[in-house]
Image (cartoon, rainbow, N blue to C red):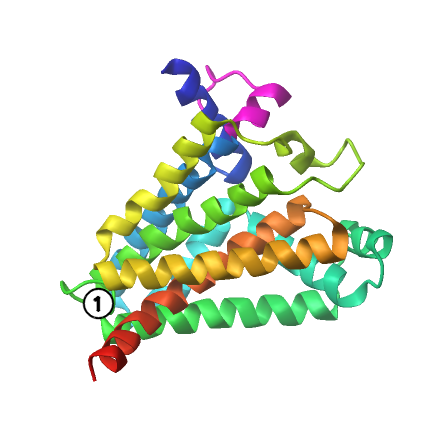
Amino acid sequence: MRYQLELFFTALGFFTRLPVPAWVPWSPERLNHAARFFPLVGWVVGAVGAASYAVFALVLPASLAVILSMAVTIRLTGAFHEDGFADSCDGLGGGWDKAQVLAIMKDSRIGSYGTIGMVLMLMAKAAALIELTRLGATAPQGTAAGVAAALLVAHPLSRLAATSLIHLLPYVRQDDSAKSRQLARRLTPMELAIAGTCGLLPLALLAPSEALGALVAVVAVTVWAARLFVRRLGGYTGDLLGATQQLAELAAYLGLLAAPRLAALAAA
């Protein structure tokens, strides 16, 4: 159990800016085995986002509370996944062949595709969460509980989507200095079970139709992303994992918004 706890803290230190206890040892091998707890890190990020939204919503309009909550989670993760999404937009949007795409994604500068993609992604996530505050789509207890449930579900589930690509696709960068190379290893059945449990368990917070809507949306986006990555590059990079997390998070929110409407159409 101590080893598993150390791996969790290793993942937490890699994927967030939270301090890690000094007694936790670090090595590339431990980071290599820490991917199993990527969805569990989503529990922490989602909980911080939900708590910050609830606090801000006490004194501010819901729309501002949503935006400030997003700012808190971005600060918490150091914009780790958002940066990967922007780099992926630049590479896939501006590159013609594999070598060019990889070179563009490695460039620290952000281009037009990355800027536009990031702005649209942040706007879409904010709009979806604001709509959830108005509709109370994820929980009958009220708007704050609805947004809290959405955050608590979307962050672990989206990180499970990214973890699935680590297991299913080959890593395509040959640069040993890339940080994500340390995670480039197929997961064992036990590791998959841990990641799957951590990623899927929060769905229990939702009504069955809402959980199904979020899950179907995330699976669809993940399959689409995996096919795109294989077609363009033959596998994944760290930036593409960040892009998958961002796309899957947005897909979860959209699935939650669509679920009650689809249920109403089915009942009509």
Which residue occupies 34% across, 64% down?
213
Res. 110 in view: no
Count how many numbered circles sit on residues in the image.
1
Disc 1 marks which amino acid? Thr
Figure quadrant of residue 100: bottom right
Q: Nearer the viewer, residue 23 or 42?
A: 42
Q: Can you say whether 206 is above or below 264 in the image?
A: above
Spot occupied by residue 250 in the image (x, y as percentages of width and height): 46, 63
Q: Can you say whether 130 is above or below 162 in the image?
A: below
Which residue occupies 64% across, 43% down?
169
Which region shows up in magenta? 20-34
Q: In the orientation shown, which residue stands out farthest toward the bottom?
A: 268
Which residue occupies 29% across, 51% down?
203
Q: Secondary structure at mark 1?
A: helix
Spot occupied by residue 65 in the image (x, y as percentages of width and height): 33, 65
Which residue occupies 46% across, 56% down?
219
Q: In the image, is 149 to the left or to the right of 94?
A: left
The residue that disc 1 covers is: 143
Q: In the image, is 245 to the left or to the right of 226?
A: left
Spot occupied by residue 50 in the image (x, y as percentages of width and height): 31, 53
Spot occupied by residue 69 in the image (x, y as percentages of width and height): 38, 58
Quadrant placement of the C terminus = bottom left
Asked if residue 128 is among those painted magenta in the image, a careful observer would answer no
Q: In the orientation shown, which residue stands out farthest toward the left?
A: 141
Q: Can you say whether 127 is above or below 154 in the image?
A: below
Asked if residue 22 is among those painted magenta in the image, a careful observer would answer yes
Q: Nearer the viewer, residue 158 or 190?
A: 190
Q: Nearer the viewer, residue 111 or 38?
A: 38
